[in-house]
Image (tube, grey):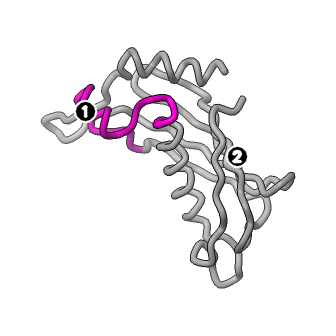
């Protein structure tokens, strides 16, 4: 149940002293692929602010399980699926592969937020965006 597929080439600077991808890079890639996914269905962080008065979609939870090392020069496929659409949040599953070899599996929970007196508050997912996210979830 893949919603979107992106590609990432492992650069020298992505690796640690052992020559394998330094783990925070998986979180950076998940974040950038999330933003590619949202742009592909017609909304981005700027549109959330300008059209819906939302501040964005910060992380509420994230994790990653590492299956096999990725190294400098590897071409990774990053497949992301929307696994849940809630009232103000969504969950995503990311699968990283190098060819047929599973490299990592990540997850994120993101919350739509607006400004509040105390800083941030959950906000309902706007109806036009909810429809797009639900189609991704169903797909």
Q: Position of residue 69 (x, y in %)?
A: 76, 67
Q: Residue lying farthest bottom?
A: 17
The numbered disc on residue 42 is none
Cα gap from disc 2 to disc 1, whole angstroms? 30 Å
Q: Which residue is drawn at 35% across and 40% down?
A: 45
Q: Is residue 48 magenta?
A: yes
Is the residue marked by circle 1 packed among few (<14), some (14-19), or many (20+) residues within 10 Å? some
For label 2, the SS is strand
Q: Which residue is drawn at 68% across and 42% down?
A: 79
Q: In this view, does 119 lie above or below 29?
A: above
Q: Check disc 1 and report the residue beneath it.
A: 114
Q: Is 104 placed left or right of 127 in the picture?
A: right
Answer with mark 2 or mark 1, whichever residue precedes in sequence: 2
Q: Where is residue 15 in the image (x, y as percent from the top left)?
A: 63, 75
For label 1, the SS is strand
Q: Check disc 2 and report the residue beneath it.
A: 95
Is the residue marked by circle 2 packed among few (<14), some (14-19), or many (20+) residues within 10 Å? many
Which stretch did the figure color magenta? 38-58
Quadrant housing residue 119: top left
Q: Nearer the viewer, residue 131 or 109?
A: 131
Q: Which residue is drawn at 60% across and 58% down?
A: 26
């Amino acid at each position: 149940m893949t919603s979107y597929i992106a590609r990432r080439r492992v650069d020298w600077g992505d690796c640690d002293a052992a020559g394998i991808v330094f783990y925070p890079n998986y979180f950076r890639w998940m974040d950038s692929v999330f933003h590619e996914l949202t742009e592909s269905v017609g909304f981005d962080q700027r549109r959330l602010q300008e059209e819906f008065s939302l501040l964005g979609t910060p992380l509420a939870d994230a994790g990653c399980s590492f299956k096999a090392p990725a190294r400098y020069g590897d071409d990774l496929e990053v497949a992301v699926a929307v696994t849940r659409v809630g009232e103000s949040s969504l969950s995503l599953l990311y699968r990283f592969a190098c060819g047929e070899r599973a490299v990592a599996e990540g997850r994120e929970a993101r919350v739509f937020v607006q400004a509040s007196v105390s800083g941030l508050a959950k906000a309902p997912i706007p109806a036009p965006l909810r429809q797009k996210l639900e189609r991704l979830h169903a797909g």
